[in-house]
Image (tube, rainbow, N blue to C red):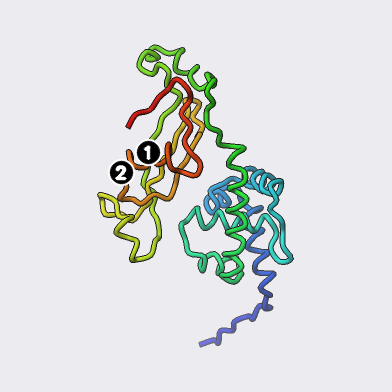
Amino acid sequence: MRPCYAIREPRRSIDEVRHAFIHRLLLYDNRNTHNQLRLYQSTFFKLVEVLKNKGLRSTKNVDVEEQVAMFLYVIGHNVRLRVVAFYFSHSVSTVHRHFISVLRAIQRITGDYMKQPGSNDTLLQQSVTQRSFSHYFKDCVGAIDGSYIPAMVNIEDQPRYRTRNGRIAQNVMAAVGFDMKFTYVLAGWEGSARDPKVLKAAVRDAPTKLLIPAGNPIAF
């Protein structure tokens, strides 16, 4: 039997491994980028530029592109920071720090992309009033609905976040106009909370309240 020999490859540094992974993730294959980050490459780099304009900056060891990629990997796959730390060859504390930085930058752009209708806003009604069912939607400016989104909470808090179907989730309320654009989102409510309670809080108690245009009253 002929002996087998394994050729020992030169050992790469952590930086080389990381750079190779980032290059393959962001530049190699567009479909792979979409599968991993939920964005195509062109959209990803547009988002990076938007966040840079909102103050997100590269650090000595992590540039903005990598920060955003780590953030998207977490929210796109619902994985723990330890998983991202392994793939991106960073410590968990580094991933956590940059996740928070990107999250705050995302919060700063919400006002640019999510605007509530004003009292004189008639644009949202045009697509409705021009159709045969306009009678049923007279003075309507949009639609409001709630959705359960899975959540990871402490064991002692799980009963409050348990839905009627037994899932651990938060009840997220969103409003959308007839142009199919989101105008309001309220997240964080426990899964056990009923939609009317969340809606009442959005109108009366939330730090950023749901605005009801003049002439379109809402009752509870």
Q: Residues within 10 Å of mark 2 (few under 14, many from 20)?
A: few
* Image side of residue 160 versus residue 128, left or right: left
Q: Which part of the image, by quadrant, shows the C terminus?
A: top left
Residue appearing at x 59%, y 45% in the figure: 40
Which amino acid is tagged 2? Arg
Report x, y in % for residue 15: 69, 70
* Foreground tag (2 vs 1): 1
Residue appearing at x 46%, y 43% in the figure: 206
Q: CA distance from mark 2 to mark 1?
A: 10 Å
Report x, y in % for residue 21: 63, 63
Q: Earlier in the sequence, mark 2 or mark 1?
A: 2
Identify the secondary structure beneath mark 2: loop
Which amino acid is tagged 1? Lys
Decide: is 86 above or below 185: below
Decide: is 200 above or below 18: above
Please state which of residues 209 and 179 is positioned toward the viewer in this rendering.
209
Report x, y in % for residue 119: 52, 23
Return the residue at label 2: 194
Which dot marks residue 200? Answer: 1
